[in-house]
Image (cartoon, rainbow, N blue to C red):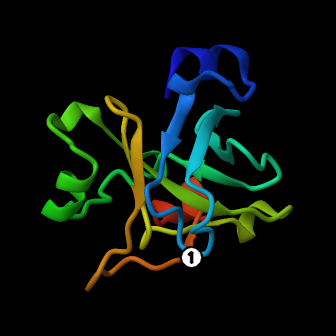
Amino acid sequence: MSDSQTATNQPTTEKEGIYTFSKGIPGFHEITEYMVVQQITPFSLLQSALHPETSFIMIDPFVYYPDYEFELPQEVVDELAITKEEHVVIRNIVSWNKKAEHRTVNLVAPIIFNIDNHQAKQIILQNTQYTIRHPLQPNVAKGGES
């Protein structure tokens, strides 16, 4: 998300590279500061700034699901102080498995980043057709054979 992260492929310790989750991430409420570490595209790592052993593999959901869409609730827009659509970046957490055919992405709980003010939040979509375990294979995602 920031040049210092993508250029080095290492976590940055600069304050500007840290995203604040005011209420943490569900299940990790006590951890509120994370860095985004660019890995192998399209994957990145969301890593705790204080506890680097706590990290999550993320993906740009539109790479595998170009039609992925949802309405961003106004309370989230307000909470993250989003003023421009281009300041919003969406990522989703991946459930990794050694076997590629068993990798999944949680499309029910996207992470919303405001890259302008470095605020972020994981939201839970309500009344959605998405699941917490969508296949993470391009051919499977697009309806083809793997």
Which of these two is toward me, 75 or 93?
75
Q: Is residue 138 above or below residue 124?
A: above
Q: Is residue 4 above or below residue 132?
A: above
Give the image quarter of residue 71: bottom left
Label 1: which residue?
A: 133
Q: Can you give x and y, in whole percent of width and height, for residue 29 in the image?
A: 57, 68
Q: Can you give x and y, in whole percent of width and height, for residue 60 in the image?
A: 48, 45
Q: Can you give x and y, in whole percent of width and height, for residue 142 in the image?
A: 45, 60
Q: Can you give x and y, in whole percent of width and height, for residue 58 in the image?
A: 59, 50
Give the image quarter of residue 145: bottom right
Which amino acid type is shown beneath numbered disc 1? Arg
Which of these two is toward me, 119 or 89?
119
Q: Residue at x 61, y 21 (%)?
A: 14
Please state if 76 lies on the left or on the right of 105 as rendered.
left
Please state if 43 lies on the left or on the right of 53 as rendered.
left
Q: Is residue 27 above or below residue 145?
A: below
Residue 111 visible in this rendered orientation of the protein? no
Which of these two is toward me, 89 or 42?
89
Most distant residue in the bottom direction: 127
Give the image quarter of residue 7: top right
Q: Callout 1: few (<14), some (14-19), or many (20+) C-alpha neighbours within 10 Å?
A: some
Q: Residue at x 60, y 44 (%)?
A: 34
Please state if 47 lies on the left or on the right of 132 as rendered.
right
Residue 16 visible in this rendered orientation of the protein? yes
- Which secondary structure lies at badge 1? loop
Q: Is residue 7 above or below residue 103?
A: above
Position of the C terminus by quadrant: bottom right
Q: Residue at x 26, y 86 (%)?
A: 127
